[in-house]
């Protein structure tokens, strides 16, 4: 049995341990009788999702991921849930968007290098913008074809915070005058968020794709390989074929030990072609 088929069979019976598990498993099984009810029940009254249902604060990353997972299921209950989630996302913004924080970062807190007028989404309310939740929120708005004035500054934020040599770290690219190293997962997410815009042709994006192909050339991390494969495939990058082979081997060797979030994103990456998260899928 092909490794992707084995992954899907395991996802049908394995227990989910949080929103990321549930969302990525649901999306991977969207053509195999998946039921969104459990994910819908985990939604907060605010319209958001948290990392763990009923525990901890609402999270922009997990809310956006839930929206992406629900997109193929066009039931009235799903559309109602999506309306609440998009309202919550639309009202949430990085703390640096406030004039007082912009003043602080421009005049006093000069140890990090970024433009505070370019903001996206924080992980949780009351914090500054971060790459992963901003990238996933952009993908969610795009997948649902929701127009929003939040998209443009969020895209600008991703470009502003790219590492000078290519790629993205979790948040800032330079701290205390030191250039931070990029991280594969965040790089892949940011590249995907920029794919369907004019900025997908920016040199920094293509340097980032080259970084992914080189950095993960010998990696055995299925989670990082899957995100990178999805991003490279979206752009038609020549390195995608090698990473696909790496992902198949890395997943097969640990199939029964991997959590659903890893199996789910691996299954999506191993589709032919790889599922790009921002596409419209029924």
Image (spheres, rainbow, N blue to C red):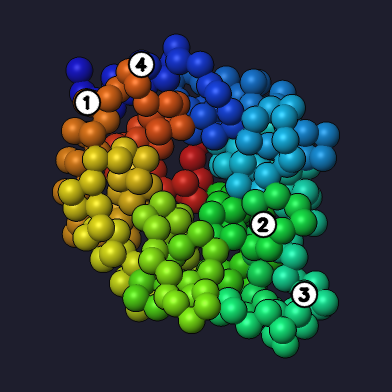
Alpha carbon distance from label 2 to label 3: 14 Å
User: Residue tagged by mark 4?
Assistant: 9
Which of 162 and 10 lies nearest the eye of the viewer? Answer: 162
Q: Residues within 10 Å of mark 1 (few under 14, many from 20)?
A: few
Q: Which residue is painted at 61% across and 67% down in the image?
A: 154
Q: Which mark is residue 122?
A: 2
Alpha carbon distance from label 4 to label 3: 49 Å
Which of 169 and 267 lies nearest the eye of the viewer? Answer: 169
**Residue 162 position within the rendered picture, expressed as x and y whole percent measured from the top left:** 46, 72
Which sits earlier in the primary sequence, circle 2 or circle 4?
4
User: Residue tagged by mark 3?
Assistant: 101
Q: Secondary structure at mark 2?
A: loop
| Residue farthest toward the front in the current orientation of the protein | 176
**Residue 89 position within the rendered picture, expressed as x and y whole percent measured from the top left:** 73, 52
Alpha carbon distance from label 1 to label 4: 16 Å
Q: Which residue is painted at 33% across and 51% down in the image?
A: 228
Which sits earlier in the primary sequence, circle 1 or circle 4?
4
Q: Residues within 10 Å of mark 4 (few under 14, many from 20)?
A: few
User: Residue tagged by mark 1?
Assistant: 253
Which sits earlier in the primary sequence, circle 1 or circle 3?
3
Alpha carbon distance from label 2 to label 4: 35 Å
Which of 13 and 162 lies nearest the eye of the viewer? Answer: 162
Alpha carbon distance from label 1 to label 2: 35 Å
């Amino acid at each position: 049995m092909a490794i992707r088929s084995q992954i899907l069979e395991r996802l049908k019976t394995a227990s989910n341990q949080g929103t990321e598990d549930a969302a990525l498993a649901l999306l991977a099984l969207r053509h195999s009788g998946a039921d969104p009810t459990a994910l819908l029940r985990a939604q907060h009254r605010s319209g958001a999702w948290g990392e763990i249902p009923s525990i901890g604060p609402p999270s922009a990353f997990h809310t956006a991921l839930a929206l992406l997972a629900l997109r193929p299921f066009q039931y009235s209950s799903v559309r109602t849930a999506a309306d609440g989630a998009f309202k919550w996302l639309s009202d949430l913004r990085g703390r640096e968007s406030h004039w007082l924080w912009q003043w602080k970062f421009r005049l006093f807190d000069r140890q990090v290098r970024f433009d505070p007028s370019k903001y996206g989404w924080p992980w949780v309310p009351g914090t500054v913008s971060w790459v992963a939740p901003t990238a996933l929120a952009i993908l969610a708005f795009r997948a649902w074809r929701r127009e929003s004035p939040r998209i443009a500054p969020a895209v600008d934020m991703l470009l502003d915070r790219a590492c000078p040599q290519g790629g993205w770290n979790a948040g800032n690219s330079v701290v205390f005058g030191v250039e931070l190293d990029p991280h594969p997962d965040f790089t892949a997410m940011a590249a995907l968020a920029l794919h369907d815009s004019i900025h997908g042709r920016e040199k920094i994006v293509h340097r980032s794709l080259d970084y992914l192909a080189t950095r993960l050339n010998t990696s055995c991390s299925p989670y990082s390989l899957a995100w990178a494969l999805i991003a490279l495939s979206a752009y038609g990058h020549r390195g995608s074929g090698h990473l696909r082979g790496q992902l198949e081997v890395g997943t097969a060797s640990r199939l029964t030990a991997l959590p659903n979030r890893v199996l789910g994103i691996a299954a999506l990456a191993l589709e032919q072609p790889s599922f790009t998260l921002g596409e419209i899928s029924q």
